[in-house]
Image (cartoon, rainbow, N blue to C red):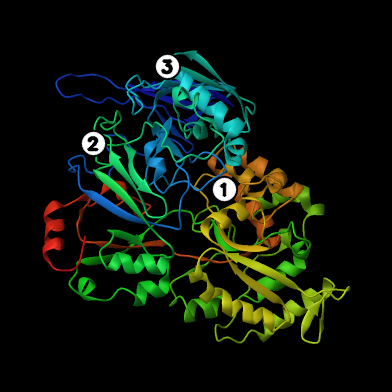
Amino acid sequence: MQYALRRRKGVNMLAVVSGTAARVCMMAVCALWLMQAGAAAAQPLTVLTMDGEPRFAWNGRHFPHADPAAPKGGTLRLSARGNFDSMHAFIARGLPAAGIGLTVETLGTGAPDNTLFEYYGLIAQSFEVAPDFSHVTFNINPAARFHDGRPVTAHDVAVTFRLLMEHGAPRYKQYYAAVDRAEELSPLSVRFYLKEKNNKELPVILAQLPVLPAHYWQNHDFSQPSLVPAVGSGPYRVKDFAMGSYVEYELVDDYWARDLPVNKGRYNFGTIRYEYYRDETVAREAFKAGEFDLYPEGTAKAWVSAYTGPAVAAGHIRREELTTNRPMGMYGFFFNTRKDLFQDRRVRQALALLFDFEWTNKAIFHGSYTRSTSFFANSELASSGKPSQAELDVLRPFAGQLPPEVLTSAWDVPRTAGDGNIRPQMRQALALLQQAGWTLQDGRLRDAAGRPFEFTLLLQSAGSTRVVLPYRRNLERLGIIMNVAMSDPTQYVNRVRSFDYDMIMGRVPQSASPGNEQRSYWTSASAGTPGSRNYAGVRSAVVDALVERLIASPDRDSLVVNCRALDRVLLWGAYVIPGWYSSSVRIAYWDKFGRSETPPATGFDVHSWWVDKEAEKALRNAGTGYGN
C-alpha cells in the first residue's frame, strides 16, 4: 500500500493509493486559516484521523457544540473524592490532584465528541508522515508558550518523551513502546522514528503526547511526587490548594491557544475549584446544600430517590440524562488470575453464574442499566451471535489453543429470572467447581487438600456494598467465602498498581478506534508490569497475537473484525464477571450555566459551558443556600 499527498481545493490531504484506486486514508492534513483581528494571517492546523476525512471543516472556526461568543469568568465548583498528595500526574507514585491535566497541553487534541480517532493541531501546527510510516515529524506552533513565557520547542518535546519513557508511569512505556526515539530537527521541528511500519495508529497517538518544559524539569526530580505545581502550558494554572480539602485553578489570561479553533468557546470559567469529599454520599449532600455546582450522578437509586428538597422543587437544581455514543468498554468484577484460586476457567465461570444481575437491576438499580456483554460495549466493535466468516478466518489459526466453543457458539452472560431464585445457576456452578476439584464438605467448599474456597473483594467505595452483599450471600449458599475489604483511595491505588488483590470492581475503557493501549489491557507482558491495566492478569499467546493483529489493522473493516475476534476470546476466557453500563450521562447542576444548543455526541463537555451571571445572581437571592 502506498501513500500520496494530494491537494484538493487548497486543502492538503494524505490519501491512500492502492494500485490505481485511490481512497481517503486514515489520516488527513487540513490547512486551516484563522483570520486575526486587524490582519489576515494564516495559521495552519493539523488534523489526524484514522477513519477518512475529518468531520469538522471549521466553517465556523470552532467545534459545533462550543459558542465562540461565550463570556469568560465566574467559578465552576466540582467535587473530587478522597485525597491527593501530588501535582505530578505522569509517574506511578502519588495521587495527583483532580483537574491537574488542565495545566498541560499536548501536541494535538481530540474533539470533545471524539467518537472517531482524530486529533486536531494544538502545540503542533503541522506534521509530516513518511510514506513508509517509518517516522513522523511534528512542527511546533511558534505561538506556543509555557506559563512562565518561555516558548515551547522541539527540545521540550524530545525531553518529555525521554522522561516519560525512563521515569514515567508504566502506561507510557507500553503506549509508546513502538516508538524508537525522538530527534530534534530544528528548534520548532521534532521527528519520531517508529519501530513498526505497519502501525498506522502511531502518528495519531503521538499527537496525544503531553509537552513538558525541559527547563523546569532539569532542576527537579521527575521520578518523585511533588506538591509544587510544575510550569505548564494549558488553559489553567494552579492557584491554591489544601490537601484533603480543595484544589483551585485559575484561567491563564494570556493563554497562547485561546483563539485556536479547537478552543474557541471553551475554557470559559475564570476559576475551577475541586472540593474533596470522603465518599459519594457526603458529596451528594454537599452538592444539594449548594457547596458546589455540578454533580455527575453514578448511582441509579440516588438518581431516582435522593434529589428532593426545596431547591429541586423550585427548579434551582436541574437534572438531565444526556445520551452518549461513547464506547463503554467493560465494567465488572475482575478476577486476578495471578492467584492460584482463579487460574481455572471453570472456577471463574462458576462464580459468574452466581451473580444475579437481573435481580440486582430490578431491586437495586431501578432497571436503569444494561448488562455488559462485550469488552467493547455500546459500539460496533462488540461481538455478538456466532462468529462471522471474517472472524472465523482470524480465529481458526488458533483453534488448537482455544476452547472449541469460541469458534462454534455465541457467547452470552448467565441470565436469571430476576426473582432471586438462582437454584439452576447454583447447580451449574457446583458442577463446574466439582470438575475443577472442589467439593462441598460441611457447608464449605474445599479443595482436595481440605482448604476452603475463600477470597477477598477489594473495594474503594462503600456505595458498592449494596451490590456486593447480595452477591456474597449467593456465594455463601455454595460454601464460598467472599470477604469484602474497604480501602482508602491512596492504599487502593497502590494495591491495584501492584496487583495486590484477589478481585476488584474495575473498568477497562475503550475508544472507537482501539489500538496500542490494548497491550496494556490484555497482553502477557503487561500482566507482569505493575501499574498496567491488565487487572485480570491475562497471559495468553492467542490474546497477544490478536492484540498485535488489531494494532496492525490496515482499515476500519479489518479493525472491527479484529476487535470482535479479540472480544470473543476474552469473553470465553471468563476473566471478568460482566457488570453493567448506561448509554446516558446523568448530571445534576445548579441552574447558573449557559451552553450551546448543540450538544456533543458524547453528551457532555463542561468546558464548553459558561456562567450566566444573571442566573447565578438569582440563585443567590432565592434563599436556597447556594454558595453559602
36 with respect to 31 (left or right)? left
Image location (x, y in percent) of residue 498: 65, 51
Amino acid marked by disc 1: Val
* Image coords of residue 133 (percent x, y): 57, 24
Taking depth in this image into account, of 436 and 87 the one nearest to the observer is 87
Number of the label disc, if any, that sits on residue 188: 3
Report the residue that reaches farthest toward the right: 449
User: What is the CA distance from the residue labelled 2 to the residue labelled 1?
Assistant: 33 Å
Task: Identify the residue at the far top of this view.
Answer: 186
Image quadrant holding the N terminus, namely: top right
Specify whether 186 is left or right of 446: left
x%, y% of residue 422?
64, 84
Indicate the amino acid at tag 3.
Answer: Leu
Residue type indicated by callout 2: Gly
Mark 3 or mark 2: name the one nearer the start of the chain: 2
Other-residue count near label 1 (Cα within 10 Å), few / some / many at <14 / 14–19 / ≥20: many
The earlier-in-sequence mark between 2 and 1 is: 2
